[in-house]
Image: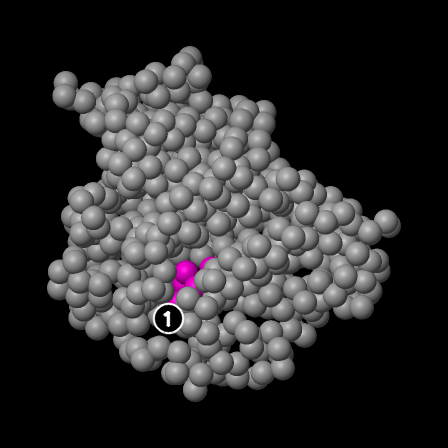
Amino acid sequence: MKNLKYIGCSLLFVLGLVSCNDWLDVNDNPNTPTQSEASVAARLPWIQHHCAYAYGSAGMRGGYMTGMITSVSDAYPGATNMHNYMPFWDPINGISTTPYQHWFVGAAANLEDLIRAAEEEGAYHYIGAAHVMYAYGYMLMVDWYGEMPYYQALGDYLTPEYDDGKTIFNGCLADLDEALKYFEMTQEAGATPLKDGDSWNDGDVEKWKAFIYGLKARWLNNLSKKSSYDPQAILAALEKAPTSNSMNTVIDHVNETSDTSGDVLAGDPLKTSYLFDSAAWSDHIRLTKYYTDMFEYPQADGTVVFDPRREKMLPMNRHHIDSTYYVDVAIHDPHFKMYISGKDTLYFMVTHGVDVVNTEILLEGGPRTQVYDADTKQYSVSAEGREGDTIFVTLKGVCCAQGGQPDETFYQSTDGTILSTGTYYTRPEAPTDVLCYPEMCFIKAEVYFRLGEKGLALAAYKEGVAAHLEMMNDKLASYGTANNPGKLPMDPDEIADFLASDCLAQTADELTMAEIMKQKFIAMTFTQQAWNDVRRFNYSAGNIADFGVVYPGLERPTGMRVTAATTKFPGTSKTDENYWWRRMAQCSHEVNYNAVELGKSNPKAFDQDIWTVPVWWDTAEE
């Protein structure tokens, strides 16, 4: 992959563009920067950008495997891109190309040059950050592919040998230890401060250390199927990981009119969120009923209690009162909520979830994209038999590069009607949670639950839910806008009532592993780790320890094509390993240019059911 190294450098440093927080504006020669001239402060944010883009685009794709999202049917004209193979669980190699390219071309190929430049001036903290990037990116490759060129990947080998998952996994942990050594060092006099080029933690070395220990806790916990699983090692890491939201590693994205140059690999704006770029740039993605049901708590009296996060994490669209139907629905359907009262009363409808598990909607030509008529103020679907699909609101937002305004990132019609408010994690200015305190709480809750310490597990679980609500509300309050109800802060009283309600486990006896993982699933929406967790518990198979079904309702889509069900996922029982989606097949670059070594990496490398082969950390094998 030597060619990738030099391609990567030319891509990164020939541009002189800008990043999420303007770090990429820094360059020794912004007009004609070269590999030798680029400063450490110019190199690191580009690497961080491409590494995070790899993770963001991976998390979006993971949303299909974890039952969060689906797409408009491939029967819909124009909806034939590769993403439309994922809702049917009929994947092709091309779906995994974007994370691979961003990691290897945009990030990994430039790490050695960053380290050399940092060594020359004694900028040790940049070396520490480089080692974290090595670990972060390669662990994604393990999560996705199981095996990957590692030791030979970035050298002079045109067809590098593959390393197995265990080798890479342990190498990533070793890189974290190496990073800690450099973050403990004092930089040489005159060395570039980390703050000048760090777009993740703003140069805060203590945050970097906490981030490292948080990654250790995350990755060690992923070994839960192995006899060597070490709860005490995880708890020890958690002691030094983020212990409050103030220590979170979060990328704050922005939507700016000047951000039109486009990412050199993906063509997307540089400052917008990666999930917006991947999942909400167009209007073909919808949320599933499995996911939207998580925010609803039916009561014995027939009423429904809603999670306060519901209207922030699910998209809404606006309906006018000049239709008797909508007034009636607004009164009786809990999906409708009145935000504005008076002469021009308008109702916002929270999306319904697409039921891809209990219906054959995918095979029946749905869900289709809805159309809004600004003259009649009505929604419709231009496909016979699919009229009911108007209840499914798209995730779509609009950034400045598409002609939107900085403070109006919702998707709207020509008459100003909001067709989608977007969601907390998928708007152009949405945050990217790289590693945050709520996840640490849920890891602690899981570990204590496994140890039988139910009281400690309950405390960590409740803290995790509260921390995620707090983290979201702090971000929502920062927007300072009332033109999008999905961006308004949650009511503190509503939050307090929810935290004290029977919607959540309030006693140790009530707490289950399923409840811990449900709340973690919500907090980890559209992340790679959500798919990792689902695989660790074998989806809804219910055959891990005595935890029962940890993800109830998470089934393969009913709309699977016959070829997918018989050749790519041939298992006939949920307890069969090859029943579930467990990895990605190698992308076409490896198939086309490194096929011999790929064939040696796994006996099923070229088999149709490679998608069902567990990666190393997802097995009992030591």
Across and down, in percent, residue 417 comes to 45, 33
Q: Quadrant of residue 128?
A: bottom right
Residue situated in front as seen by the camera: 509 or 597 = 509
x 53%, y 39%: residue: 240
Quadrant containing the C terminus in the rendered view: bottom left
Which residue is identified by label 1?
A: 585
Across and down, in percent, residue 28 comes to 84, 58
Q: Which residues are magenta?
A: 140-146
x 22%, y 27%: residue: 510
Left or right: residue 28 versus residue 615 is: right
Q: Is residue 383 above or below residue 620?
A: above
Q: Amino acid at mark 1?
A: Ala
Query: Does the magenta-highlighted stretch encompass residue 397?
Result: no
Q: Quadrant of residue 501?
A: top left
Across and down, in percent, residue 598 comes to 42, 80
Give the prevailing secondary structure in the magenta stretch: helix
Q: Residues within 10 Å of mark 1 (few under 14, many from 20)?
A: many
